[in-house]
């Protein structure tokens, strides 16, 4: 019988109630059960019919099932002790017998023939009259399956089938349904069924009496199977989608982590560079002015009437004040706190143009643009970074700076007429946010921290860096 036709179907296409009593001449029958009661009731009929007819029987089961079977047979009036004394009935422990026939984790054919075959031959010889087939029940396969030894269980089923081909035996075995609790166990259950000539389903089906009940149960099981199949398919699709999203997220996190490492390294480098620049400015300009001023003061102490030195010292002090003011403005423009980003941008663009030689056009609103402190500082740092990139990398002669408020956001854009960015590097930046230097990554991160975005456009005609940062309707964050 095939694995897909487990129960006999009559002419009316109804599934009959299955019991071991219906399979007295079947070579190898398997029962699936949910409760021990169902197993012991059917097993009692099978073994009781054989012993009551003077035939022989061998039971290889757990101690609990052997005791339960013996109690039921005695309740039915069968003298099991007499059958044992006559040698027609042999009850063996499944675990002990399994130990005797196993070798290297698998049932050994020679040991199986000696232990199991010897037991069946012994009880058959003691039967009255025509011995007929020996009624045999084995539970060793269920123990192997419960231990997760599926291959060993299948091998033992095959040894039973090979033995039944050459010996008169009516063989039965059983598996608890609790051993098949996963979706993937379905294929294994079908393989077990394929090793048997007949199958007795669990009591939820076998105990149904009327044909109408059985047909309703079959229909319900079909519906549950269809629903489970659909649920499994949906779950697999969801898991696959989740795996794809997880892979994308991991890739994104890896890219962002790499970018942040580069940014952190760049920021540390910029910090060191800024410190060196400030130290150089203090030494080369302010330091020199102060040294000259000290020399003048020493001379004036001896010659206080030197008017030329008084005039020169006054000029040196003015230069010192100017240098200190310039350094202070570069670190944090005080006009930005007082007037706003527009004023700070005007001051910085004018000074940067003088220092770099770039021709810079500035387009900012005529009315004061006041934003949250964090937003104004971010815009100023982006402006510094953008103009520094133009001066160092673009080869441009001109640049234009735009600052404007539009549609609930403030926009800063810096354009130049330089050589532009290589297309490959530009595409890499758009895809992963990396590949074009840490300066742009720094600008992008500043924009993201404030909920904004950075847009980068570049060609042989020049480059445009544009960031938009959302602002409240009144322009100033609370």
Image (spheres, grey):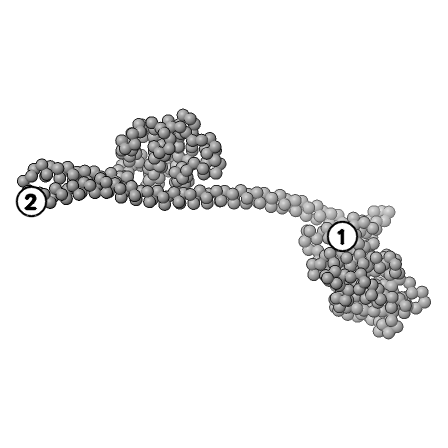
Q: Confirm or deny contact between disc 1 and disc 2 (CB under 8 A).
A: no
Q: Is residue 312 left or right of residue 401?
A: left
Q: Which mark is residue 302?
A: 2
Q: Is residue 335 left or right of residue 458?
A: left
Disc 1 versus disc 2: nearer the observer: 2
In this view of the protein, which residue sits in the foreground, 308 or 187? 308
Residue 243 x, y percent position in the rendering: 58, 45
Q: Residue furthest top?
A: 461
Where 157 sits versus 83, above or below? above
Q: Residue furthest left?
A: 305
Location of residue 412 by image quarter: top left
Q: Which mark is residue 226?
A: none
Residue at 72%, 61% (x, y): give it.
Answer: 105
Residue 200 x, y percent position in the rendering: 79, 56
Residue at 85%, 72% (x, y): give it.
Answer: 84
Q: Is residue 471 left or right of residue 332?
A: right
Quick one: SS at disc 1?
A: helix
Residue 172 x, y percent position in the rendering: 81, 60
Q: Residue furthest right?
A: 129
Q: For the residue carrying disc 2, how many other residues have a C-alpha within 10 Å: few (<14), some (14-19), or many (20+)?
A: few
Q: Which mark is residue 191?
A: 1
Location of residue 450 by image quarter: top left
Q: Earlier in the sequence, mark 1 or mark 2?
A: 1
Name the quadrant of the C terminus.
Answer: top left
Q: In this view of the protein, can residue 285 be seen by the observer?
A: yes
Q: For the residue carrying disc 1, how many other residues have a C-alpha within 10 Å: few (<14), some (14-19), or many (20+)?
A: some
Location of residue 455 by image quarter: top left
Residue at 77%, 68% (x, y): give it.
Answer: 93
Quick one: SS at disc 2?
A: helix
**Separation (CA) of disc 1 from disc 2:** 114 Å
Where 271 sits versus 25, above or below? above
């Amino acid at each position: 019988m095939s694995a897909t036709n487990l129960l006999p179907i009559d002419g009316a296409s109804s599934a009959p109630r299955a019991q071991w009593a219906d399979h007295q001449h079947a070579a190898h029958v398997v029962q699936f059960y949910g409760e021990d009661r169902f197993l012991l009731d059917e097993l009692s009929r099978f073994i009781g019919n054989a012993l009551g007819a003077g035939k022989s029987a061998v039971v290889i089961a757990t101690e609990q099932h052997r005791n339960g079977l013996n109690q039921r047979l005695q309740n039915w009036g069968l003298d099991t002790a007499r059958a044992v004394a006559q040698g027609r009935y042999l009850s063996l422990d499944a675990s002990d017998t399994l130990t005797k026939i196993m070798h290297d984790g698998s049932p050994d054919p020679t040991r199986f023939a000696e232990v199991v075959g010897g037991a069946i031959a012994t009880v058959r010889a003691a039967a009255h009259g025509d011995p007929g087939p020996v009624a045999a029940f084995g539970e060793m396969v269920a123990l192997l399956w419960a231990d997760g030894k599926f291959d060993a269980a299948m091998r033992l089923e095959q040894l039973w089938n090979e033995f039944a081909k050459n010996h008169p035996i009516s063989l039965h075995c059983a598996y608890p349904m609790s051993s098949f609790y996963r979706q993937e166990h379905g294929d294994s259950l079908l393989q077990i069924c394929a090793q048997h000539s007949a199958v007795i389903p669990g009591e939820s089906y076998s105990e149904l009496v009327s044909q109408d009940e059985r047909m309703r149960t079959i229909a319900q099981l079909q519906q549950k199977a269809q629903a489970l199949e659909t649920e499994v398919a949906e779950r697999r699709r969801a898991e696959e989608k989740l795996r794809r999203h997880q892979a994308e997220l991991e890739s994104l996190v890896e890219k962002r982590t790499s970018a942040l490492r580069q940014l952190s390294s760049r920021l540390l480098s910029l910090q060191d560079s800024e410190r060196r620049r400030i130290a150089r400015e203090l030494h080369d300009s302010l330091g020199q002015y102060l040294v000259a001023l000290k020399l003048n003061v020493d001379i004036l102490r001896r010659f206080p009437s030197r008017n030329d030195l008084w005039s020169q010292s006054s000029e040196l002090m003015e230069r010192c004040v100017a240098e200190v003011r310039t350094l202070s403005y570069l670190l944090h423009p005080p006009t930005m706190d007082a007037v706003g980003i527009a004023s700070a941008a005007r001051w910085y663009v004018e000074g940067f143009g003088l220092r770099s030689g770039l021709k810079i056009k500035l387009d900012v609103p005529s009315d004061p643009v006041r934003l949250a402190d964090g937003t104004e500082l971010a815009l100023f740092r982006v402006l510094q970074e953008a103009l520094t990139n133009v001066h160092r990398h673009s080869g441009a002669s001109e640049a234009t700076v735009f600052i404007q408020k539009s549609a609930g956001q403030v926009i800063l854009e810096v354009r130049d007429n330089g050589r532009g960015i290589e297309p490959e590097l530009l595409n890499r930046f758009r895809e992963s946010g990396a590949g074009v230097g840490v300066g742009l990554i720094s600008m992008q991160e500043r924009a993201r921290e404030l909920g904004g975005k950075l847009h980068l456009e570049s060609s042989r005609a020049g480059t445009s860096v544009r960031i938009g940062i959302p602002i409240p309707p009144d322009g100033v964050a609370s």
